[in-house]
Image: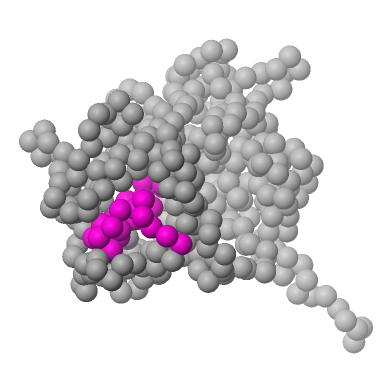
Amino acid sequence: MSSTKLKTSEPKTPTAIIDNLDFIGNPFKQRQFSIEPSITSVADADTDIEHVLKFLYSYNGSHATFNAYRRELERLLQWAWRIENVSVLSLKREDIEDFIRFCIKPPLAWIGTKNVSRFIEKDGIRMPNKAWRPFTVSVPKSTLGSAKKLPTPDPKRYEASQTAVKATFTALSSFYDYLIQENLVTANPVALIRQKSKFIRKDQQRPVVRRISNLQWDYVLETAVIMADEAPQQHERTLFIMNCLFAMYLRISELVADERSAPIMGDFRKDHDGHWWFYVTGKGNKNRSITVCDAMLKALKRYRLHLGLAALPVPGEQTPLISKSLGKGAVTSTRHVRRIVQDCFDRAYKRMQSDGLEEDAADLKAATVHWLRHTGISEDVKFRPREHVRDDAGHASMATTDRYIESDLRERHASGKRKRIKDL
């Protein structure tokens, strides 16, 4: 970088720049772009924000992708404008390397201790949230104490994961490819980094599939049944959600309504042979059909009868798959579903504790919703044809499905622990 650019020895807390998709409007229909001088004095900042917004708006069909890319590009803008005092259009290979190092160890003033919205509404006006930070430190769920309160995260303990670094490379590379297509830059500085291994370590070991054990799943499901029996108005939905996540390997995003799809009861369909399938729009806006096993069909009947519906859906039925507990319509928040699942995990953990199985219950303290998908796939791949599991799971390749073969290291070790070398 030029030695004439201003440097900030102690970077101040940045102000959020890019609002949610619902509030930025369509940048392709916008004639002028401007950035407040209080945010940056970089001459080409208006051009930067114009093309960042246009690039991000290209992903308006997927909030998840938009949010992921916005996170990375917001950080890039903040760093280029506030730290380097330059336009992102001028960044070279060595600058991107500096930015990656910055993201791996950002200044404390840029690290928050909780996830908050970038903007808030005050008197009908959208304003930057002063509590927002470009980076967020968290503590593992496994540190949850008996008081059900997580310890306060320490910004000094922030550490960028390998997954986070890879995500940064991916977003930036896509953005600069877009800029090349728009004839705004001549080369992709990310693609020119030949030694990404400086930042991304290669793991020679097979990635471990995070799942709960069979014993833990038995307790989780039994707990969900107890909850549903004791408080059906509140927890019949909980039981149905747990069954969907495990038996059909659904991702959490495939349970809720969003801009991509709105799952309905009519997505359960019976073919000419009398077999039931569940049709879903999944990751990458790809449609797939999922085998509905007899146990899942039984769970569906139980939930529908609780709702006062016929035991099985009729063709074209528009009833939301997961309805709101209060009000009408479908659940739209993945965070709400996470809370439901976490509550079930917490109760199952306590039951295992009370049964003297605290050590066996340990993983439930760290488990997330996605572990149920992994667990369902890991169990099915033991006895179903791999290609059938692949298609139900929506895996792009068999290699992904093969990761789940013998994925439970506890069971693998238990089966080999008593191997005999010599008769004694």
Residue at screen point 47% across, 57% down: 189
In magenta segment, residue 244 = no
Residue at screen point 18% across, 65% down: 12
- In this orientation, which residue lies closer to the viewer: 201 or 344? 201
Can residue 122 be seen here? The reply is yes
- In this orientation, which residue lies closer to the viewer: 209 or 367? 209
Most extreme residue toward the bottom is 424
Q: Position of residue 162 (x, y in %)?
A: 50, 64
Q: Position of residue 414 (x, y in %)?
A: 72, 69
The reply, left or right, for residue 153 in relation to residue 173 is left
Which quadrant of the figure has residue 33? top left
The reply, left or right, for residue 189 in relation to residue 416 is left
The reply, left or right, for residue 163 in relation to residue 25 is right
Can residue 117 be seen here? The reply is no
Residue bounds of the magenta highlight: 67-93
Q: Is residue 10 above or below residue 319?
A: below
Q: Position of residue 338 (x, y in %)?
A: 41, 46
- In this orientation, which residue lies closer to the viewer: 371 or 312? 371
Q: Position of residue 46 (x, y in %)?
A: 24, 43
The reply, left or right, for residue 101 in relation to residue 191 is left
Locate the C terminus by quadrant.
bottom right
Colouring mode (rainbow / by chain / secondary structure / one colour): one colour
Residue at screen point 28% across, 71% down: 3
Residue at screen point 45% across, 25% down: 262
In magenta segment, residue 85 = yes
Locate the N terminus by quadrant.
bottom left
- Judged by its main secondary structure, the magenta piece is helix
- How many numbered tags mark residues here? 0
Which quadrant of the figure has residue 409? bottom right
Most extreme residue toward the left is 123
